Image (cartoon, grey):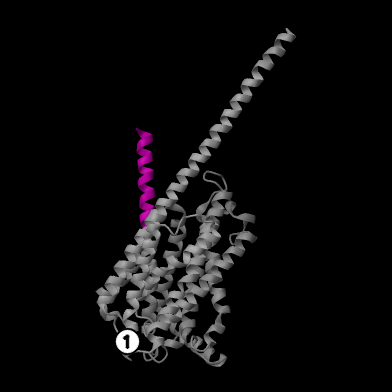
Amino acid sequence: MKSQRKERCSNWREHLLLIILTVMNIVGQAMQIVTVVLWFATVDPDLQNTMGFSVLIATSIPPCIVFGLVIVVRWLQKCKIFKHGHPFWYGWREFGLCSIIGIFNALSQLLFFYSSDSTRTSAILQPILSSATVFYSIPLTKWILKDNKKYFSLLPVVSLSTVLVGLCIGLIPGIIAIVHGEADFGGALYWPFIYLLSYAPVSTYNVLQQYLLLDFAKRHPEGSPSRDYISETLYIVFWTTLWLLIGSALMFWMDLIPGFGSNGSLKGFWSSFVLGMDCGFGVISDPTICQGTPLYTYLYAVGYVLSYWASARLNEQSANYTMLSQVCVSPLAVCFWLVFPWLNPSPTPQPLWSIMPALVLATVGLIMWRAWEIRVEAAEQKMQYKQDKEIGDISSHDDDNNADEETPLLTHTESLIN
């Protein structure tokens, strides 16, 4: 009875932890989608399109500091579990993978911030466009994780088609505006396309992060003395976030690209960057330039820390809760703009006849997709378990046979001695 109670209590605590991580992931991702729009809205309209690089750097610095401090605290608690006794060392192979993940994250964030200004991509449309992640993840999963799922079977094709139809419905108002001459191609389709494109690197670094976590689990099985998943996750989130900052800084030249960047010279880039950093951290107090911007800088950083940590933990802990967090982000962000429409800075509000069907179809498609993935993965794990069990039974049977063969020989030898 006591063991059953302990087991029930343990299961209850595990589910509670997963629920907390799921809420953290959902709220954190929704905060990022919403606060970046509000960040740009606090800046003078004539300067908004020149600050994409500034907000990228400004929002990347606080998470690096937070994760670095947490690693130090963890090291002080359990210094023996860190390789070479150093809190920031991870191993050369893992360090290389973390740097690649961080660079892809930087590219994703760069495209995301440059297209997130509500004058470029409608604020309420952005959460729906984030559903495009699923399309990018398929080839990467097959290539990196050696996935053998049958993606061309009925259910995945129907679910992906549902998501695609939802995305297209969300873009219809922009196409209509172009046809009627009410909007140009850049404002109606070009920047929403860049926003869609920003989720390609997201899928890349998510799959690479999953690969890194799986690799660690193989090298350090459950129950082994070297297994400390929290410390491993801390390493991943710290180094990838640091490389996000480094990679973003190295991509400054993209701000000079005509049609994408907002500055035509290095001098103009530097002046816009300094002004944006001053706004982001509250150095400038002139309300005609920016007002309240630091609030959204830190709110975005909080959302990043919450979601990045929670998603890394959920990737290893539970496929069901991961699915739940993925499908709830878009509805939550859309609901925010519907409940607080006066905060929506978009110059041309997206019509509900487009938003609601697009949201429903994209969400339903993602649920169908993730439900299929979970079912297939469960079947694969069951098959692997049966194979491992059969191999174990065969090995045990061979050992028994060997023992039986040795016993008569020993008895015969003893009889000769006697």
Give percent across and percent down for residue 172.
32, 79
The region drawn magenta spans: 1-20
Q: Which residue is depicted at the point 25% across and 76% down?
A: 353
Which of the image's four quarters has the C terminus? top right
Q: Which residue is depicted at the point 46% across and 48% down?
A: 380
Query: Is residue 175 positioned above or below 137 on the image?
Result: below
Q: What residue is pinned by disc 1?
A: 177
Query: Is residue 406 positioned above or below 82 on the image?
Result: above
- Magenta span has 14? yes
Using the rendered view, name the quadrant where residue 320 is placed.
Answer: bottom left
Using the rendered view, name the quadrant where residue 245 is placed.
Answer: bottom right
Give percent across and percent down for residue 376.
43, 51
- Magenta span has 104? no
Q: Helix, strand, or loop for circle 1?
A: helix
Give percent across and percent down for residue 105.
51, 70
Q: Is residue 93 left or right of residue 26?
A: right
Instruction: Name the amino acid, label 1.
Output: Ala
Give percent across and percent down for residue 289.
40, 90
Is disc 1 surrounded by few (<14), some (14 to 19) or many (20+) residues within 10 Å?
A: some
Q: Nearer the viewer, residue 175 or 300?
A: 175
Q: Which residue is depicted at the point 31% across and 81% down?
A: 173
Q: Nearer the viewer, residue 157 or 119?
A: 157
Which of the image's four quarters has the N terminus? top left
Q: Which residue is depicted at the point 31% across and 90% down?
A: 180
Using the rendered view, name the quadrant where residue 212 is placed.
Answer: bottom right
Q: Nearer the viewer, residue 403 or 40?
A: 403
